[in-house]
Image (cartoon, rainbow, N blue to C red):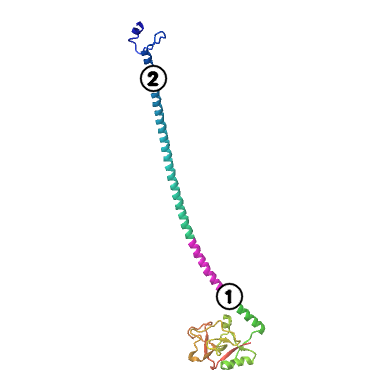
Amino acid sequence: MELESSCENVENCDIKDKNVPRTPSRIQDEGKAQKRSKQNVLFETEINVWGISKVFAFILNVSYWRSERDLIKSYKNTVEEFNQTINSLQDSYTDLMTEKHQLQDNFNSLSQKKLELETRIKDLTDEKDQLQRDFDSLNKKGTVCFFMSTELKSWSDCRQYCRDRGADLVIINTEEKQVSLFSERVWIGLSDTENEGIMKWVDNSPLKQGFWFKGEPNNSNGNEDCIELNYNREETGWSPLNSWNDYPCSEKKKGICEK
């Protein structure tokens, strides 16, 4: 009884005396105290776990938010780079198409020049062949001699005059020869007496290059089949390279012979 009185006004008295007998009520109180202590520990543990889980969840949320933000930023950067690449490719495509059109124009221009050069080469080749034939003919004949009939005769009589002297009426197939033979109105060795409109030289070769007055030959009155070299400076459109005229073969003129 003295022990109980000594602890009566003391808070948190925790006196344990093994010699104090443990009554059933005391045992029950101690069990409740232990139970409350365990409950307190469990409650504190639950609070700690809850707090830690909240903190961990917060950390996870922050980490997720940062990761999502970085992902969005990365996506935006990727989209921007993709758009820049598309724009760059579009510019390159436009430049290439422009260059393609320029190359096509150059190709067309070169193709046209190629055709023109081929035509020119063909003309020059034909001219070369003609000059070679003339050269060979001159070599066969030896020295070329030109002379003129002394009397006025028809085209056929002038030709006979030339042939009687081992020659024939002149064949003019170059500009140089045309210019060098100017003297007066004379017959040359060209006619279409066999077929109207088909001019042939006295050696039966076809006419390739003519030196006509403007509007000639015109076969006026239907009987102009022989060709004269008209040395008439007053004639309209006359020039050394524009002086041939078709005329009736029966007209009397001198003729130029070539031997």
Q: Are marks 1 and 2 in contact (CB under 8 Å)?
A: no
Q: Badge 2 is on which residue? A: 35
Most common secondary structure along the magenta stretch: helix
Q: Which residues are magenta?
A: 100-119
Mark 2 secondary-structure assignment: helix
Mark 1 secondary-structure assignment: helix
Q: Badge 1 is on which residue? A: 124
Residue ID at (61%, 78%):
129
Residue ID at (58%, 75%):
124
Q: Is residue 142 visible?
A: no
Please name whichever residue, 26 or 123, is drawn nearer the observer in this view of the structure.
26
- At label 1, the amino acid type is Leu
Please name whichever residue, 91 or 151, is drawn nearer the observer in this view of the structure.
91
User: Crowdedness of circle 1 by 10 Å Cα count: few (<14), some, many (20+)?
Assistant: few
- At label 2, the amino acid type is Lys
Whether 242 is among the magenta residues is: no
- Earlier sequence position, callout 1 versus callout 2: 2
| x and y percentages locating residue 47 in the rendered image | 39, 26
| x and y percentages locating residue 104 in the rendered image | 50, 64
| x and y percentages locating residue 249 in the rendered image | 54, 92
Residue 253 found in image quarter: bottom right
Please name whichever residue, 19 or 23, is drawn nearer the observer in this view of the structure.
23
Relative to 101, is 50 on the left or the right? left
Residue ID at (43%, 47%):
79
The quadrant of the image that shows the N terminus is: top left
In the rendered image, the residue lying farthest to the top is 2
Foreground mark, 1 or 2, reads: 2
Measure the alpha-carbon separation of dots 1 and 2. 128 Å
